[in-house]
Image (tube, rainbow, N blue to C red):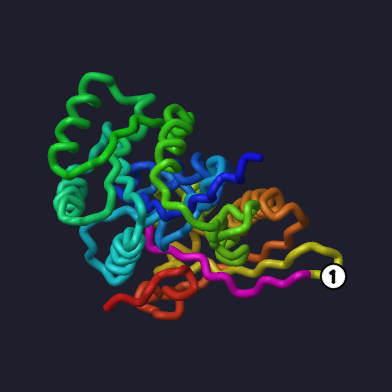
Amino acid sequence: MTSPKQQQCGFVAVIGAPNAGKSTLVNAMVGQKVAIVSAKAQTTRARLMGIALEGDTQMILVDTPGIFAPRRRLDRAMVSAAWDGTQAADAVLLVVDPVKQRRHELEPLLETLAGRPERKILVLNKVDVAKKEPLLVLAEELTGKADFAEVFFVSAQSGDGVPEMKAALAALMPQGDWIYPEDQVSDASERLMAAEITREQLYKQLHEELPYDSAVRPEKYVERKDGSVEIHQQIVVGRDTQRAIVLGKGGSRIKAIGEAARAELTDLLGRKVHLFLHVKVSENWSEDKEVFEEIGLDWVR
């Protein structure tokens, strides 16, 4: 008789400049959506763990906020969350958009990574829209700036190269029992995931109209006797003019945001969802410790 294979389990931190495609890559590796994505930079705010399986290996993917030069308390908390996500990781993936590159944020990141002990892997994303020759030149240049063990060329959007990268990562994970059940795909609570999905719809539907300074606070999450769930959320903005944008004419915009979020949540949770949204103006919400805790960030001075 052959003995059963030894399980493997490890942590993979996914870092990079804003908008490099980190959340899309995490979703692709997990095989379903666990992190919200948007064309707006710095969409991810807190550390969020996606759980990917590859044979007998479980990989806990730490999807971190994009690392940039922080100015406000919210910025500092997000950058702190990103670096905290790399602590004790069995591998650190640096995801780079080879088209935009964002050198002003990428270069300091490479300098910091060069002095860190974790196994570092370079992932050049969006290769479906990048030209091959400049891509190879960039890979060689970046490899010389930090001690990357491997380089992968992928498209998180189309999935090209992702299975090969996932298999290679799984081989690097240490032996050990799985931390999470086989059917669990994220460590985020349904309550927090629901708030994130509404925030994603804010970004999708309002594009450039609504600034980055907005938040969605979970208020109530009630299990009804009929098996459905009742969710109440507060959309926080900084000014009255932003409140008007979110509401739309006759409440049309917030209704559309609610309908889209409700449809996605119904699909995600597999049951009927009653979603109630309201908008609050709070000029200094980004200095409110309670808000930070609700959206999964540590209070950073």
Q: Is residue 11 left or right of residue 138?
A: right
**Res. 180 visible in picture:** yes
Residue 279 at x, y = what percent?
A: 54, 68
Q: Is residue 15 magenta?
A: no
**On-image quarter of the C terminus:** bottom left
Q: Residues within 10 Å of mark 1 (few under 14, many from 20)?
A: few
Image vertical order of residue 223 relative to residue 112, above or below? below
**Res. 78 visible in picture:** no
Q: Is residue 250 left or right of residue 170?
A: right
Q: Residue at x 66, y 40 (%)?
A: 1
Q: How many marks?
A: 1
Q: Residue at x 48, y 57 (%)?
A: 49
Residue 185 at x, y = what percent?
A: 58, 53
Q: Residue at x 55, y 57 (%)?
A: 178
Image vertical order of residue 131 relative to residue 239, above or below? above
Name the quadrant containing residue 189.
bottom right
Question: For the stretch drawn in magenta, what is the main secondary structure?
Answer: strand
Q: Nearer the viewer, residue 205 or 245?
A: 205
Residue 69 at x, y = what percent?
A: 21, 58
Amino acid at the residue labelled 1:
Lys
Q: Residue at x 28, y 39 (%)?
A: 122
Q: Is residue 205 left or right of residue 182?
A: left
Q: Find the magenta span and give its range.
A: 212-223
Q: Where does label 1 land, which residue? A: 225
Residue 14 at x, y = what percent?
A: 37, 50
Image vertical order of residue 133 relative to residue 280, above or below? above
